[in-house]
Image (spheres, grey):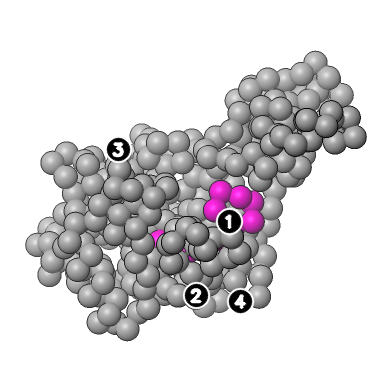
Amino acid sequence: MSDVAELIEKLSNAHGISGYEGEVSNIIKEELEDYVDEVKVDRMGNIICVKNGSEFTQMIAAHMDEIGFMVKYIEESGYLRITPIGGWFSQSALNQRVILHGKKGKVLGVLGCKPPHFMKDDERKKVIEIRDMFIDIGAESKDEVKEWGIDIGTPVTIDRDCKRLGKFITGKAMDDRAGVAVMIEALKRTKTDATVFAVGTVQEEVGLKGARTSAYRITPDVALALDTAPSTDFPGAENVKIDVKLGKGPVITVADASGRGLIAPKRILDWLVETAERNKIEYQLEVGEGGTTDATAIHLTKEGIPTGVISVPARYIHTPVEVISLKDLDVSAELVARALETSKNYFE
């Protein structure tokens, strides 16, 4: 378990909004280069780690990008205006400390807004939108901002270190660094004789882009997207009527986005459920109504690819304080490893 804990801490603390996933890609390369026969980065920036085997091919994919921001305007006074990259709930972004990844290195900043002391009564009652926030890096002019290597288009991530929370762990970007950790651990553990393509995909949070291009290139016989699933084990979630809890094992997706994303084929569900039960792995089933995963893009590639999703349950997704269970992380990797060994029985 300690290896898994160290891995997720390293991945969560790495930085990379959509289109700028290099730090995470480097970690994947370091972790897997001794376990695979080839590591390559394609034109989109997806990292593809290939473990050679038989002609039967399997793809496991986890997206490397995290939600963040990008500088869109620099005030003459030195304050920065931003646009969100990925799906933010504005209240989760306000008053966060951030890192700007400039041409001369990392620059610390804080996300601020007009304080309540200066707000009118009706303003205090409204949610403050990201367009009304700004970043303060301590600069006193636009020229000084540029001297520090910050310009239009500079990517911005949350400044938050991963910490233990009892038997859980909390940090930024668990969506989807948890999935990346599962992919790495599963490939290390599996004894499959099939060929495996482990793909760290780019730009999932802004349109499943890397999954679409990498799946087209690989065209595997079967695929798994590895992601996180919103848990419903906290106060206020009772009315959601979806039963996903931390500590209860990996989540197998039956359908997501009310069927607009992925509806898992019966063979996929049989494969994953029977593999879990055969190996006495506790699992959860999910029919989701909200978001989707890389599986949506993968399963619609060319004439279609049988694709499933295995997710790590997570609280507070798309915030800087996402919470997951280390036990779920470890067991999810175990299920993926065993599934890779049995897939030929269902799809060859």
Mark 1 vs mark 3: which is more N-terminal? Answer: 3
Mark 4 vs mark 1: which is more N-terminal? Answer: 4
Give the magenta part as a residue range: 309-323
Three-letter amino acid code at disc 1? Tyr
Mark 1 vs mark 2: which is more N-terminal? Answer: 2
Q: Going 34% across and 66% down the picture, which residue do you hit?
A: 285
Residue tagged 2: 247
Does the rendering let one see residue 168? Answer: yes
- Cα gap from disc 2 to disc 3, whole angstroms: 34 Å
Three-letter amino acid code at disc 3? Thr
Q: Which mark is residue 316?
A: 1
Mark 3 against mark 4, which lies toward the viewer? 4
Three-letter amino acid code at disc 2? Gly
Mark 4 against mark 1, which lies toward the viewer? 1
> Is 45 situated left or right of 342 in this image?
right
State yes or no: discs 1 and 2 in contact (Cβ < 8 Å): no
Does the rendering let one see residue 11? Answer: no
The image position of residue 207, as x and y in percent, is: 40, 36
